[in-house]
Amino acid sequence: MVNHMFWPIIIITIAAVIFQERERFTRPSVKGLLHPAIFVLVASALLYAIFALLGEPQRGYIMFLSAIFGGVAALASLIVKSSLKSDLGSRVLTVCLSLGALALSAHFFAFWNPITDVPFLLTGFAASASLLALYYRKKYDLFALSSLGFVSAMMVVRNIDVLLIGVFGALAAIIARHLCKSDWSRQTLVAHALIGVGAFLAAHSLGVLSVFSAGLVGALASLVLLPLSRFYTHKKYRPVKSIARGSGLASVLEASLVPVLILCGALLLAYAVGDGYYGVAIAGSVLLSLASLTLRERSAVSDAYSILQSSAVLIMALLAYHDLMGLIVGNAARIVNLVKVEVLVGLFAGAVLVLLSAIVSTLSSRSVSLILTDVIGTLIALFLLKGEAAAALIVGVVFVATPLAWILSVGSAAWSEATGEDKRIEHSIMSSALVFVALALAIGPLLV
């Protein structure tokens, strides 16, 4: 079961948001929720149908329930968002809803399954949330990011207590806002200091000292990446000005390379100090736990930071998939032979899926076109590419989606600088990447 501190912290966090933002609450709206509710039912039924066709109707029923839980919680997060006219408050409550729903779902499934198997049953939850985020473009992004990230972390750590890190992050954000008011720089420092304390308490709870070391790595990485996102995507700094003048190819490459290198370096360090995959999952969870922290600009800056958090989630999901294949097939599945033709095909297929999704999302305003492209493309790829080739497909998705989405964010900032308009290049690259990986986690084990 989840750690005894989890529910008190969630209740305190929600109470703090209600008290601090009490004047910004309005009547909640349920208008427009019928179509998302139908979409959740259809997506859940689709998951069940896939499992039934592959000869696993019992597991399909579990995935159906898991997907329903994820969809209902996501709809609840949208109701909360509509009733609170505060960006920080709505983000904190969204994260709390995600974590609370995951914990309740874990308790539910634990009645019939060993607790160590429960994280693997929550992949339907993450898949449903990711599909909603893709279909309704941006409305459910934070919920989907939090759900997939912490499901992946639980799969790697094989302990649902990792959810404790997420609630510490949400509480840190609201405390930092209360203490520092409108001083964003101080808010950031205080929130990161508090999440460091949270990492220590989580390490004590899990009984693993390496959790603290890996958590510190994640907090320091976030502390560096936040101002870096601002530097590379805000119009008053050199990179965006250089690109806007039409002489910024080097700046584009620099802006794409430096943050990704820092993120990868932090995860490698977490791997070294945190006992391998375990440390990466903890560092990624800390980085993700600060997703509710509000940036001053709701623009390319916040988009860029969200891309880096999404990248950490995708890497955690890749590790979870790799670990899951190892449990099913044995240690041989943990080795991906890049010389094999099917593995190379998997890498290219992942890149093609991301590029195809980017093209469809920019050319078509219809979400149905995008989701059909992504879901059908992912299912075909997973059925054709099995085992290590499917793992290679996820690698291709992760390492193409991140720089491409980042370049578009930098391009949006340069466009605003050059034209004087606050105009962003709309795309769904990271949302599509989350769907690719969530479906792979849910369905991939059946195709080994």
Image: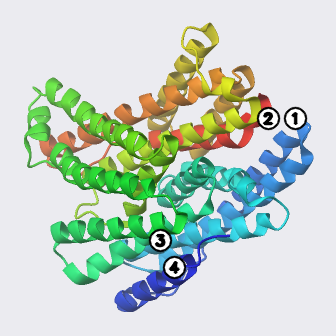
**Disc 2 or 3, which lies upstream in sequence?**
3
* 24 on left or right of 421: right
Query: Residue 307 lies in what quarter of the image?
Result: top left
**Disc 4 or 1, which lies upstream in sequence?**
4
Q: Where does label 1 land, which residue? A: 54
* Residue type for callout 3: Val
Q: Are marks 2 and 3 in contact (CB under 8 Å)?
A: no
| C-alpha separation, residue under disc 2 versus residue under disc 3 | 33 Å
Front position in the image: 400 or 163: 163
| C-alpha separation, residue under disc 3 versus residue under disc 1 | 37 Å
Q: Are marks 2 and 1 in contact (CB under 8 Å)?
A: yes
Q: Position of residue 396 (x, y in %)?
A: 50, 25
* Residue type for callout 4: Ile
Front position in the image: 37 or 228: 228
* 35 on left or right of 6: right
Estimate how packed mark 3 is, as few (under 14), some (14 to 19) or many (20 or more) residues with alpha carbons within 10 Å. many
**Disc 3 or 1, which lies upstream in sequence?**
1
Query: Residue 340 lies in what quarter of the image?
Result: top right
